[in-house]
C-alpha cells in the first residue's frame, strides 16, 4: 500500500464518525432520499494511480459539478467569446447574485452560479436540439472518464423540471435582457439533464484528471484542452467554485474545486492528481461538509496547495 | 544576463509604448500629480536574484498593497480570531460591498476591501496609541524588506485624512454595528498612514518575498510566518486581491496579487519569486492597467501560474 | 358650458403643443405603433356630469391601470387575506423591487408593481380556468363603466405573451417561494389579457367613479365596495400607483392615481370626480408625461388635492 | 363635553389596557428609561378647540417628528431648490435605504429618512453656526406652538452625539458624494439637538396645526407657509412619514403623519385638526404601536381620512 493510499484511508476513517452531519439537499425528493451516511473518496494521480475509500464506486447526482464540463464544452465550441455572455468574478451570496444580475444587465457573474451555467448551456445548445445537446454532454463525460456506464438519472431530471421554478425565473430573466438565444424551456431541458448526471467518485476524478495534467488526460492520452485553458478553468474553479464559500475553500483547502448540491466535490491538484469526494450532508454554504473537511485534510497531509510548498 | 532578466526587460520594453494608458487616481492631489509615464518592474527570486526594469527604484504610494502587511501583523497578534471581525470571501463590486456590509451585520467581506482593512487596522491598534501603531507598521515593512529608508509620505496621509469621507463613513458604519473597538478617528489615523507608505518596486518585491518562500525571507533568513499562514495569505490575495477584478486577474495572470490605487501591484509566484510592478494608469476595476498586462506576460513567459505547469 | 368643462378644455389646449414629448413604450410593437400625438381627457363628477377633451373617446391599452380593478376583484373574493401574498408598501425603483422580492421571501411590495399584480391575478384565478377569469375581469369592467363595448385587444395580449420574459421570470420567482398557487403560464395567460384591455378615457373615468364616491357608482347606483374599502384602495393608489414616481405624483398632483405604460392615468378626487387622461409619451418613471402635467394643472385649477383645501 | 372630546377619551380608555405593548427604543439610555405606560393624546381643531387625554401635557423626545419642522424651515430658506439634495420618494426598508443612497449617488430618497433629514439640516445650517441653527429651530417650534417652554433635552442630545455612529456614517457618506456642504460633525451637532426637542402632545399638535389649515395657524393667525406648500408637506408625510410602514399607515389611518422613535406621532387631518399621540412602545416598523392604533380608531370614528368621506 502506497503512502497516498494510506492517507486516503486514514482521512476516510477519521471522518467516518461524523457522517450524517450537515443538511442533505431536500428541494427535490430524489436528492432528499439519499442515504446521509454515504461517504466516498477517490484520488487519481497524473501517474495513473487510483486510490479509493468508502463509497467511491457508487454513483451519485453530480449536480453543479457538471458545470465544469459544460463550460469546457462551451469553450471548445465558442472559444473566449463566451465571456460576452457570462463574467469571471465571484458572486457573493445567492441573495446577491440576482441583484447583480439585474445591476449588470443580465450578465451572470460567472459560469458556476446557476444563471451563468444556464447561459453556458444556452451556448452548448447552439445548432442542436435539446436531445442532441444532452447526448453530446453525456458522451463528453464518457470520453473524459473513459467509461461507458455514465448516465443521466431521469427521475432526478424530471423532478428538477417539475419544481425548478427559480431556474425558470433565472432563464426568463436572462431572456428578458436578450442574453439567452433559445427559449427558457429548451435550455432548461438540457440544463436539468446535465445536473442529473450520475457518476461515482472514481468516474468523476478520472473525468477531471485532464485539469490536473495541463489539459491532457494521462490515462488515455487525449488532449482535451490546451495548457492555458486548463489553467484558466482551474482559476475559475478556485475563485468561483463553491458559491459564497469559495474564498473559505481557497483559504482552507487551497485547491481549485467545484461542489454540487448532491454532496460531491471535484478538486484539482495541478501536476499531482484529481480528487473526488462525496458525502450528502451540506454546510451552510451548500457545499459537502464532510467532503470539504476531507479535502482540507488531504491538502494538509500531501502539501498539495497551489499556494506554496 | 540571465534569461529572467531578459524576460523582464523585454516585457518592459514591449509595454513601454502604452505608458499613459488608463486613468490615474485623482481623488487626492498627491496621487493625481504622479507622472503617468512611470513604469517599473522588480522580480526577486527565492534564490536571491533581483531583476529590475524601468522605474524600479523610485518610491510610490503603495496604498492598498499595505493591507497584505497589516493583515500579516494582525494575524501575528491575534491569530485566526481575526475572522470574527472580517470574512474571507470576494466582495463583488464596490456597490455590492456596502450592501453586503449592511446585510451581514457589519462584517466586511474580506481584509482587502476598505471596510475590511479598517477592521484589521483596528485590531493592529489594540494596546497602542495611533503613533505607536504607525511606527510598528513602518518598522515591520523595513524588517521585511531589510531596508531602512521606507517612510510614510506625510502629504499623502494628510490629504487622505482631509478628504477620506467614505472611509469615515465605513468606519462609523462598522462602529454602529459594534465591530470597531476604537474611535473611527483613531483607526483612520493609522489607516491613512499605512496607505501612504512610499516604497519602490524593488523594496516591495523584497518585502513580499516571504510569501513566495513558505513564510521565510530567503534573503535574511527571517521566518515571518508559518508555511500554512503564507499559503493562506496567498489564497486571500488570489481570491480577493483585486477588488471586482480578482476573478479576471486569476484567470489571466494566475498568481496571488494585491493592487493599490497608486498603480502598484505585488504578485507572488510560490516557490519562485516575488514581483512588484508600478504604472499609475488604472483599468476599470481600479488596478494598474500596464501593471496587470506586465504580470500576465510574465506569467505566460515563465509559466509561473499556480494553476498548472 | 360649465366652469369645469372650460378648465378641462383649457388644460387640453395649453398642453396640446407639447404632444409627442416623452418616450412611447416600445417593448411590444402594438404599443410602439400608437400615434404619439394622441391626447384625451375625461372628467366624470360624482354628480354625473361628464367633461371630455381631445381623444377622450378613443380606446387605448390600459395596461397597469387594470391592476386597480383586479385588486378590487381580489379583495371582493378573498377579503383582507390577500395581504398574506402581497404588501402595501411603496417599492422604490424597478431595480429595487426585485431585490426586495428576494429579500422579503417572495412577497411583492404592493399590488401595483408587476410581481404584486401577478400575485393578485393568481388569487383572481382561484377556482377558474384562465378563460373564465379573463371573462370575469372583462365583465367587471363593463359593469363598472356601464358599457358593453369594452374588449381585450388580442394582438396586444398575444404580443405580451410572446415577449413578456421578465413577467415569466417574476411569476416563476414567486412560484419558487411557494407564493403562486397556479402555474406561471396560467396566471400570465390571464395577466396579459387584463393588461391588454382597451378602453377610452371616458370609459375609464366612469369605471373608476366608485372610488370617488365612497364605493358606490353614482351613475348606476351599484355599490361596488364599502366606504372603507374605497378609501383603502385610494390610499394604495396614492402611495404606490406610479412606480418610483409615486411620491412625486403625490407631491405635485395630490390625488390617488394609477398609471399604465400605454400612456393612460386614472386619478380619483374623493367626493368630487374620477379623471382619466391619455397621452402615449412617458416620463423617466414610465408614467404619461403630458398626462401627469394635465392632472397637476387640473388639481391646481380645481383645488382637488386630498391634502388640503 | 363635545362629541370629539368623548371620542378622544373613549379611544384612550379602550387602548389603555394595552399600554406597555411594543418595544421601547433603547439605542440610548435616555430613551430606554422612559416609562412604557405613558400614553397621551391631543387633538387641536382648526376651530381652536383642544381635546386632551392621558399624558398629553408631559414632554417627550419628539425625535424624527422634528424633521417635518426642519423641512419647513429649509423650504422657507431655499425653496424648491432643496430637491437637488433630497428626493421625494418613499424609501422602503432601512436596509434598502443605504443601498439606494449608494445607487442614487448620495441623494437620499426623502427628507424623512435619516440621511435625508441630515441633508436638510445641512441646508438649515447654511450661513449659521451650529449654535445659531439650533436656536433658530427651537424658536421656530416655539413660534409654531405659540409656547415658550419648548426646550432641547441636553442629556438626549449628548447621548446621540456619543453613540450615533450610523448617523456619522450617513453624514460622511453624503459628504463623500459632495452632497453635504458642512463637516459631518457640525451638521450632526444640529441634527442631534433637533431630534432631542422635548414637547408635549398638546404642544406638538399646536405646532402642526398650520398643516391642517392651509398653511396658516388659526390660533395665532400666523401664515407659516402657502396653501400649496402645506399640501405638499402633507403629501410627503403621507408617502414617507412612517419609514417602511408608510403604506400601511396610509391604508389603515389615511392621514398624513410623522412618527418618532420616542413614541410620538403627529397626524394632520386637512381642514379639520392636528393630532398628536404618544406611547413609547414601538411596532416592527419603529412607529408607536398604541399611537398608530389610536390614530386608526380616531380616523374611523371621525371619518377624517383624506381618501374619501
Image: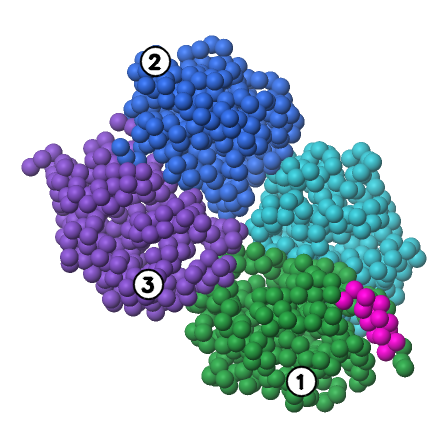
Chain colours: A green, B cyan, C purple, D blue
Q: Are marks 2 and 3 in contact (CB under 8 Å)?
A: no
Horizontal placement of C57 versus D176: left or right? left
Q: Position of residue C109 (x, y in %)?
A: 44, 48
**Residues in magenta?**
A5-19
Tell me if I can see residue D172 in this picture. no
Q: Which mark is residue D1?
A: 2
Circles 3 and 1 on the same subunit: no
Q: Are marks 1 and 2 in contact (CB under 8 Å)?
A: no
Vertical position of residue C118 compared to residue A45: above or below: above
Residue lying furthest left: C1
Q: In the depicted view, which residue is nearer to us: A95 or C206?
A: C206
Q: Which residue is mark 3?
A: C128
Crowding at label 3, few (<14), some or many (≥20) Cα neighbours within 10 Å? Answer: few
Chain letter of the residue carrying label 3: C
- Is A278 covered by the magenta stretch? no
- Report the mark closest to the observer, 3 or 1: 3
Circles 1 and 2 on the same subunit: no
Residues at marks 2 and 3, CA–CA distance in whole angstroms: 55 Å
Horizontal placement of A117 versus C10: left or right? right
Q: Which residue is mark 1?
A: A144
Q: Secondary structure at mark 1?
A: helix
Horizontal placement of B241 versus C250: left or right? right
- Is A11 covered by the magenta stretch? yes
Amino acid at each position: 500500500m502506497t503512502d497516498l493510499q494510506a492517507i486516503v484511508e486514514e482521512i476516510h476513517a477519521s471522518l467516518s464518525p461524523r457522517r450524517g452531519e450537515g443538511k442533505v439537499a431536500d428541494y427535490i425528493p430524489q436528492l432528499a432520499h439519499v442515504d446521509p451516511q454515504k461517504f466516498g473518496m477517490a484520488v487519481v494521480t497524473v501517474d495513473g494511480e487510483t486510490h479509493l475509500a468508502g463509497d467511491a464506486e457508487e454513483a451519485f447526482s453530480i449536480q453543479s459539478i457538471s458545470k465544469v464540463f459544460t463550460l469546457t464544452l462551451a469553450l471548445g465550441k465558442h472559444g473566449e467569446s463566451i465571456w460576452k455572455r457570462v463574467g469571471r468574478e465571484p458572486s457573493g451570496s445567492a441573495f446577491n447574485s440576482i441583484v447583480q444580475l439585474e445591476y449588470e444587465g443580465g450578465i451572470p457573474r460567472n459560469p458556476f452560479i446557476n444563471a451563468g451555467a444556464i447561459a453556458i448551456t444556452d451556448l452548448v445548445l447552439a445548432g442542436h436540439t435539446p436531445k442532441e445537446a444532452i447526448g453530446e454532454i453525456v458522451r463528453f463525460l464518457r470520453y473524459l472518464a473513459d467509461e461507458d456506464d455514465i448516465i443521466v438519472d431521469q427521475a432526478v431530471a424530471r423532478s428538477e423540471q417539475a419544481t425548478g421554478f427559480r431556474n425558470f425565473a433565472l432563464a426568463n430573466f436572462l431572456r428578458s435582457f436578450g442574453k439567452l438565444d433559445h427559449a427558457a424551456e429548451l435550455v432548461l431541458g438540457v440544463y436539468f439533464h446535465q445536473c442529473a448526471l450520475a457518476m461515482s467518485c472514481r468516474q468523476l476524478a478520472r473525468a477531471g484528471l485532464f485539469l490536473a495534467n495541463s489539459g491532457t488526460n494521462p490515462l488515455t492520452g487525449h488532449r482535451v484542452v490546451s495548457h492555458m485553458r486548463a489553467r484558466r478553468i482551474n482559476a475559475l474553479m478556485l475563485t468561483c467554485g463553491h458559491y459564497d464559500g469559495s474564498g473559505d475553500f481557497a483559504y482552507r483547502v487551497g485547491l481549485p474545486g467545484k461542489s454540487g448540491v448532491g454532496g460531491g466535490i471535484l478538486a484539482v491538484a495541478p501536476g499531482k492528481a484529481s480528487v473526488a469526494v462525496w458525502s450528502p450532508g451540506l454546510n451552510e454554504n451548500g457545499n459537502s461538509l464532510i467532503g470539504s473537511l476531507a479535502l482540507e485534510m488531504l491538502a494538509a497531509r500531501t502539501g498539495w496547495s497551489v499556494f506554496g510548498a
